[in-house]
Image (cartoon, helix red, strand yellow):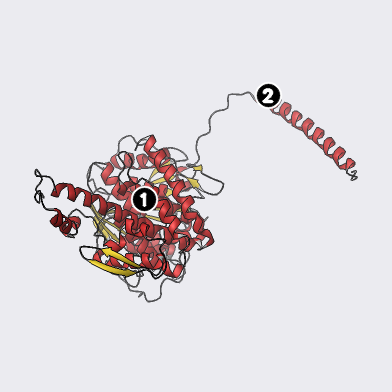
Amino acid sequence: MNTEEQQFLNDLDKQLWNAADRLRSNVNPSEYMHVVLGLVFLKYISDAFKERRTELEAAFKDPANDYYLGDDAGELIEQELEARDYYTETNVFWVPALARWDFLKDNAKVAIDSVLTVKNGKTYEYKFKGIGRLLDDALEAVEKDNPKLKGVLDKSYARWRVDEALPGLIDEFSKIPFNHGALKAKDILGHIYEYFLGEFSIAAGKRSGEFYTPKSIVGLIVEMLEPFEGRVYDPCCGSGGFFVQSERFVVEHGGRIGQISIYGQEFNPTTWRLASMNMAIRGLDFDFGKEPASTYTRPQHPDLRADFIMANPPFNMKAWKEGVKEDDPRWKYGVPPDGNANFAWLQHMIHHLASHGSMALLLANGSMSSNTNNEGEIRKTIVEADLVECMVALPGQLFTNTQIPACIWFLTRSKAERNGTRARRGETLFIDARNLGYMKDRVLRDFKPEDIAKVANTFHAWKKGTGYADEAGFCKATTLADIRKSDYVLTPGRYVGAAEQEADSELFEDKMARLTAALSEQFAESTRLEAAIRKNLKGLGYEI
């Protein structure tokens, strides 16, 4: 993406966010996210449908095209333009007339109890009860005509009572050019969806962790795992960020959509719908199970063995164990404690890992060193099984929803020589990335692209055995014997040591002279300011 296209997207973000922000007075942030994203979804499928319809109309009138219907086929063309198969064959959602954006825009402000005429191959009447109800009915019609979306769309506009704000919001969305240069509607609306998820996560505060993982962390994990082909699984998929980034990785490296098979699970019904919409906007095929459900008690993919697994579960989750048996086959390395689900998530993912699969899991830092409630023994058993490939310590303040320090566990079923990598049996790489990144504002930290590249390139160089070297304070290749000596503690700082300090070429006497001179100037300035403050206070009658 060039600079001009990126600037276009940045300007578009601000314009749409400002338009959406008018809902603040009507709806709380946790709900107006869904108000906006539902409209984004309707706009996307309508634009894609309209673009395909235009292509078909031109093809039906072109004698050189296989779809040509004849010179006098006006009525036949109109009928064929309403044939569902022409759209679904190119993975475009069929959009019933009631849900098409032009119809919604044209009728957003009509009077209550008006009777609208709707054409969809046949003509029928629709009694208007408000724009909120119309949007609910439109989404219901989309679900009915697209079984893949059954139960996915949030049909709550009438309940939210935002009819006064919706016409203006629809007008704003209608003004936006959803094609720009090489950017297609899918690219632009996918970007908008991701941008809104990030902004809503900040607005919603702590609760945002239910659905959003910062883009830079997702990007780091994907760059390290390189999920180019195979089955990709996230057992707590939130809004589906890992899948979106994986699809981008495939395309950017010359692959095609469809090389990865997407499997996910999510407990929260609202978040489950967000993820499904996120996949639909990008035209990705996915399997999120029949329903939102607990990964522990109702796993939706019990027989899945995935090539790549990525997840950001809730940190230190308590009271997760109800309905889970002590002899569950997933607990191969030890029974996780009821008071903390960290090692339950870890073992669930290992259980679903294919024979040559790799996985990455975000966990709280305590998972690397805790010895309470059997956690130390579980970690020891996993280390002795030679599953731990790499540990990455992250900087603080990366998450909108928690200040708990975090790390990334990278595990693999096989450290044997494979696909250009050397044999790494009995070895683990430790990376301390706590000093990387920058403060994007007063609260949140973020990675720069070069930070992600530094960590990912170090990992890949170590795996290949070419161009890697230990760097004090940053990375260290360690043996299983060294980890045993450290009582199976996996904190990178314990292994990488301290960074080397640059030698100070300034003589001690010269440095002290320079520093004392500077200190003398500061003392003099302090005396001057004190005198000025005393004078001002005296003028106010407060002599000290």
Front residue of this view, candidates 115 and 379: 115
Left or right of residue 118: residue 513 = right
At a point 74% along the width and 32% down the height, the residue shown is: 522
Q: Earlier in the sequence, mark 2 or mark 1?
A: 1
Establish if 14 lies above or below 326. above
Name the quarter where the C terminus is drawn: top right
How far across and down, in percent of the image, does residue 42 sit? 33, 58
Front residue of this view, candidates 263 and 518: 263
Mark 1 crowdedness (10 Å alpha carbons): few <14, some 14-19, many ≥20: some
Establish if 514 lies above or below 167. above
How far across and down, in percent of the image, does residue 163 sit? 45, 64
Front residue of this view, candidates 70 and 252: 70
At a point 28% along the width and 40% down the height, the residue shown is: 464
Front residue of this view, candidates 294 and 461: 294
The image quarter in which residue 368 lies: bottom left
At a point 44% along the width and 42% down the height, the residue shown is: 11
Point out which mark residue 509 bears: 2
Q: Which residue is mark 1?
A: 480
Amino acid type, label 2: Glu
